[in-house]
Image: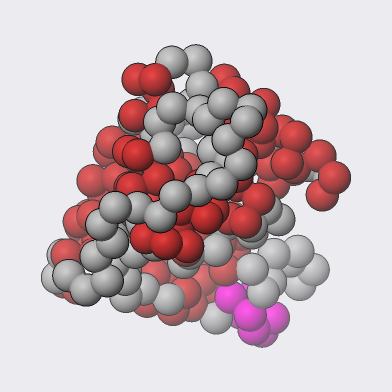
């Protein structure tokens, strides 16, 4: 949220400061970084698999989860079509903002979600049957704020729209992280192996001793 509100020239510096606060105080912090890194870089998260949800299906499921009336459900489903929205509506065309404007009143004012709960929810969406996904969202909506829902939906759609690509984020986490990812295509490997920050003289990356191309 913080990054999304900044001018382009300030985004990287803000992220560097955030990482210093969250990831770098101790080795234990870095060892626990995978849960957050896979949310910051959803497009790189090959481990969780495909959610199988685009805007139309996601809107339909959330509408069912809340029992929305037909007018509101149509506004979400037809988020690009001005004919379904009040005149002068400012969010037409952005699915997540349209969804948030309608669903927001049903959400909590204060979030009670943890990273682990978000991670578990996203896992359940991937493996769960289509008919059960509305119930999963009903359970989520009982704990999250409208802003929580906004970012969870952007993660599911694998486009945070914060104006900071993974090519900028990974080197902030570790100078060798981007190169390591290009070897392994695994965020988990980066977070588990690149725990120690390198000395200032370290300039090259040795290829991992074992790389699994097919699993």
Q: Nearer the viewer, residue 131 or 193?
A: 193
Which quadrant, please, contains the N terminus? top right
Q: Is residue 105 above or below residue 65?
A: above
Q: Position of residue 98 (x, y in %)?
A: 59, 63
- Residue 185 at least partly seen: yes
Q: Quadrant of the C terminus?
A: bottom left
**Which segment did they paint magenta?**
79-85
178 left or right of 111 in image: right
| Residue 114 covered by magenta stretch | no
| Residue 121 rendering spot, x and y as whole percentages | 26, 49
In the visual, does 146 lie left or right of 27?
A: right
Instruction: Give me the residue at 61% from left, 41% from top.
Output: 203
Residue most toward the top? Answer: 25
Residue at 55% from the left image edge and 81% from the top image edge? 78
> Vertical placement of 99 versus 81: above or below?
above
Q: Position of residue 172 (x, y in %)?
A: 61, 39
Q: Residue at x 52, y 55 (%)?
A: 179
Observer able to see residue 40 = no
Q: Is residue 2 above or below residue 214?
A: above
Please state if 178 lies on the left or on the right of 87 as rendered: left
Give x and y (percent) for residue 187: 39, 51
Q: Residue at x 33, y 48 (%)?
A: 189
Q: Nearer the viewer, residue 169 or 74?
A: 169
């Amino acid at each position: 949220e913080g990054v999304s509100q900044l001018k382009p020239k300030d985004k990287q510096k803000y992220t560097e400061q955030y990482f210093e606060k969250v990831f770098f105080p101790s080795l234990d912090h870095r060892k626990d970084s995978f849960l957050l890194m896979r949310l910051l870089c959803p497009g790189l998260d090959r481990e969780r698999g495909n959610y199988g949800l685009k805007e139309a299906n996601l809107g339909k499921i959330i509408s069912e989860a809340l029992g929305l009336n037909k007018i509101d459900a149509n506004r979400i489903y037809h988020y690009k079509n001005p004919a379904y929205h009040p005149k002068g509506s400012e969010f037409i065309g952005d699915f997540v903002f349209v969804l948030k404007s309608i669903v927001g009143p049903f959400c909590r004012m204060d979030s009670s979600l943890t990273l682990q709960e978000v991670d578990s929810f996203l896992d359940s969406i991937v493996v769960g049957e289509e008919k059960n996904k509305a119930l999963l969202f009903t359970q989520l909506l009982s704990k999250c704020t409208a802003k929580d829902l906004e970012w969870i939906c952007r993660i599911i759609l694998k486009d945070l729209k914060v104006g900071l690509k993974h090519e900028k984020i990974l080197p902030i986490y570790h100078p060798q992280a981007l190169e390591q990812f290009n070897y392994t295509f695994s965020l988990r490997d980066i977070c588990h192996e690149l725990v120690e920050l390198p000395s200032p003289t370290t300039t090259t990356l040795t290829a991992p001793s074992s790389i699994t191309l097919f699993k």
